[in-house]
Image (spheres, rainbow, N blue to C red):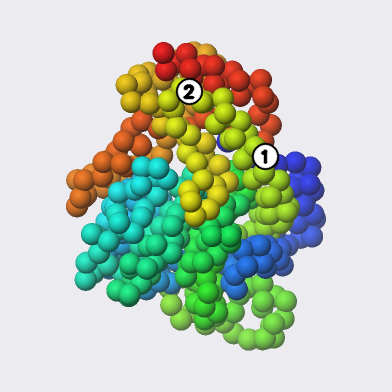
Amino acid sequence: MIPWLGEEEAEAAAEAVRSGWVAQGPRVAAFERAFAEHLGVEHAVAVSSCTTALHLALIGAGVGPGDEVVVPSLSFVATANAVTYVGAVPVFADVDPATGNLTAATVEPLLTGRTRAVVAVDQGGVPVDLDGIRAVVEPRGVTVVEDAACGAGSVYRDRPVGAGAELAAYSFHPRKLLTTGEGGMVTCRDGGLAARLRRLREHGMSVSAADRHAGAGGASVLETYDEIGFNYRMTDIQAAIGLVQLRKLPAMVARRRELAARYRELLAGTGARLVDDPPHGTTNYQSCWVLPPEGAPDRAELLVRLAEAGVSARRGIMAAHLEAPYKGTGRVPLPATELLTRRSLILPLHHALTEEQQDRVVAALRAALG
Ligand SMILES: *Cc1c(COP(=O)(O)O)cnc(C)c1O
């Protein structure tokens, strides 16, 4: 993934530096407003990463020690780690092999009296069926937090991904579509909760440093620290870049979908399956993953053959339950997760990819498949 950054972002960052205000300030506030407006949600709280966004979202959902949180193992490890940060236990559910995402059917058997939340991931940008999961868990008092780290620019039931969630978390790491270098966002419906998340990202301070400086409430107002918070702030330099990137998001998604459609055409007849739009939405193709046909050489061999042909494909999504901290903690078999993590690979896809390069990738894949 090569981020789509240019002079406009460089200029915006430089302007923030020249202004003298580089920590969380007016540009962060403007980025939050623009992001909330893009999603059509009430509240967006900018933070330092999606990992910290997930941490705050889980605190906001009231998850704590002794609770269980159902998560996909097939995700970047931060999804499970955030659950561990709040002292809860991640309970791994399997995914739909077609989308790589949790479904109501994979989540429901894992619900217990201790389940407090479900983290539903939009893996690789493919929208998860949020409503389907909410319908089975909400009647049991369980909150769905959407890990929309990969989801900016994807659509779920005619709305931007995450817009329908009680709490959603986004990533602006350069491996995602929209980047601020590092960065994240939590969105939520409730104003009181948004205010608490704003305090938590800034050491639990009752009045933010930016507001005190701007004289809101008067510089003489003494802040208090009513609960233990964190330093999860985004800087104004990052937010300045984010504002430019957000304007570019529709073009980024259009370009990726165009390239992915061409990959799909070129792959016809190879037996390799390209991840696709689910019935309930459209993906931003943040990851363009393919599942090679049964009987194909194993993935390590495919990656070697592709590398020899000058094509840098990557392994597909990891599975947390196969990594040291979570090994042996599974409660149910995860056959689709294990198939996808073992077999899938991610094809090169970035805005500047040419048709010739794409042709070369697919020719190499055809040859590698034998
Ligand atoms: C990238 C990613 C994260 C972590 O995002 P950061 O901004 O790097 O902290 C979390 N969850 C998923 C599904 C991701 O893809």
C-beta proximity under 8 Å, tags 1 and 2: no
Is residue 327 something one can see in this rendering?
A: yes
> Quick one: quadrant of the C terminus?
top left
Disc 1 vs disc 2: which is toward the camera?
2
Point out the tag, 1 or 2, that comes first from the N-terminus.
1
| Mark 2 Cα shell of 10 Å, populated few (<14), some (14-19), many (≥20) | few
Is residue 2 something one can see in this rendering?
A: no
Determine the CA span between mark 1 and mark 2.
Answer: 24 Å
Residue 251, x across and y down, in percent: 71, 46
- Decide: is 26 above or below 336: below
The image quarter containing residue 111 is: bottom left
Q: Which mark is residue 271?
A: none
**Frontmost residue, 83 versus 352:** 352
| Mark 1 Cα shell of 10 Å, populated few (<14), some (14-19), many (≥20) | some
Q: Amino acid at mark 1?
A: Arg
Label 1 residue SS: helix
- Decide: is 14 above or below 304: below
Residue 35, x across and y down, in percent: 64, 62
Instruction: Tell me the residue that label 1 is attached to.
Output: 255
**Frontmost residue, 110 versus 32:** 110
Instruction: Tell me the residue that label 2 is attached to.
Output: 269
- Decide: is 175 above or below 12: above
**Frontmost residue, 348 versus 235:** 348
